Amino acid sequence: MSDAPTRRRIRAQGSAHDPLVMRFILDASIQSGGTRRFDAPAADVPLAQALFAVDGVTGVQVTGETVLVTRAPEQDWDGLKAPVAAAIREVLNRADPPLGPPPEAAAGYCDDAAVLAAVTEVLEARANPAIARHGGRVSAEAVENGIVSLRLSGGCQGCAASSRTLREGVEKMLRAAVPGIRGIVDVTDHEGGANPYYRGKPGEGPAFFRPVPHDAFSIEDGRIAIDPDYLAPRLGLTAEALDAGFRNGDVVTERLSGGAEGHLRIAVRGPARAWAAEILPDGTAHEIPSPRERAAADTANAALAARIRAHLQALPESGLPVTYGRLARALGLYLPGSIRQVTAALETTMHEDARAGRPFIAARAVGRGSGLPGRGFFDLARRLGRAPRATETDDAFHRRMLWASLRPRDGGANASEPQQRSVDASTRSEQQEARRAR
């Protein structure tokens, strides 16, 4: 029987990582449900029976609209692609459902839809109410074969503590509440946030490393193919909208400069988002921040750092140190995540001061409860070569850094503040009295 009336478009995509694997991608989902894996024909699964009947097929995995087929080493895809595609078409034209009844308890089966629903419920009921108090939010973007993709937003995007929040808090909570979870990955673009934390030094590549699945892209004769199921969500699009965008020019692909020798960098830009990756000589790839998002974030951070510097320089000593919250409000920052924007900009001023050999003006800002700067101030000071002395406490080190920022002409960054001097209200009064006496 001819399949011309119902001929389905099937696109074959090889794997740069494993030559024995080929993806056969359709225009629509093969059957609702989670991922199915087969190492041999299954009596009640027509698609598995048809594919294993093709000589040379040794493994089958079905996810959404994609059939992942593994061949025997002695076979080649030139002879297998057409028979495999024909078998898929034949089953989809005659069998309903092509994967048989949903085998809820079958080995290798993961009900991704159920896991996604359960994860979303736990996040909304238990995790996000607490995270919202810090201006952040965590959402479940997708589940594939039990691997949950989480995206952080608001104050969590780019936050230095986001990794600890995810691993020590959210991940433990989810694993305890949802047994079907096989893994959790953070798909947040921290580099593109208002407070980018995963940032390298100028001229260096990004500090985060998020591998691209080996079966999500391929290179053939210099042409790069990216699985739309993988790419579309990262651009905030559906697979259909992504395909239409490529046709009408709303989505464009370009090669980027930079990277190590032999590394290829590409970017795909959509109407609202951009995605970029670096492909290594061995055929593996990892995501990198898109230049547009990174540049915008760096520009905003630098502008805020300049405003903070000017404000701190203008404050009288009687108003120092100032809390992060009061500093944010003085700059007109009231939205959730403002404190993190301020602390990130303060870290930028520390880099600037270290390069110029100046005292840290960031020492003039502190947390509300402790009266000391956040942990990031001390960690960054060490990385910039201004570590506390051997027996110096955090409090003493901060007082010394603050005194240096107020008295740069008396020794600058390395000024030694007398240990009995404390920059509190009483000390400031003494300083004012001394100035009046002079």
Image (spheres, rainbow, N blue to C red):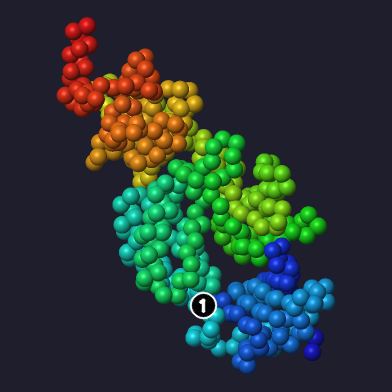
Q: Nearer the viewer, residue 180 or 89?
A: 180
Q: Residues within 10 Å of mark 1 (few under 14, many from 20)?
A: many
The image quadrant of residue 21 is bottom right
Residue at 68% of width from left, 53% of height from top?
279
| Type of amino acid at the residue the image marks with label 1 | Cys
Q: Nearer the viewer, residue 255 or 236?
A: 255
Most extreme residue toward the bottom, as rendered? Answer: 43
Quarter of the figure that contains the N terminus: bottom right
Q: Is residue 292 left or right of residue 91?
A: left
Q: Nearer the viewer, residue 283 or 130?
A: 283
Q: Where residue 298 sits in the image (x, y, percent)?
A: 51, 37
The image quadrant of residue 71 is bottom right
Q: Exactly how many numbered labels are in the figure?
A: 1
Identify the residue under disc 1.
110
The image quadrant of residue 293 is top right
Quarter of the figure that contains the C terminus: top left
Q: Where residue 371 sits in the image (x, y, percent)?
A: 25, 36
Most extreme residue toward the front, as rendered? Answer: 390
Residue 283 in view, yes or no: yes
Most extreme residue toward the right, as rendered? Answer: 79
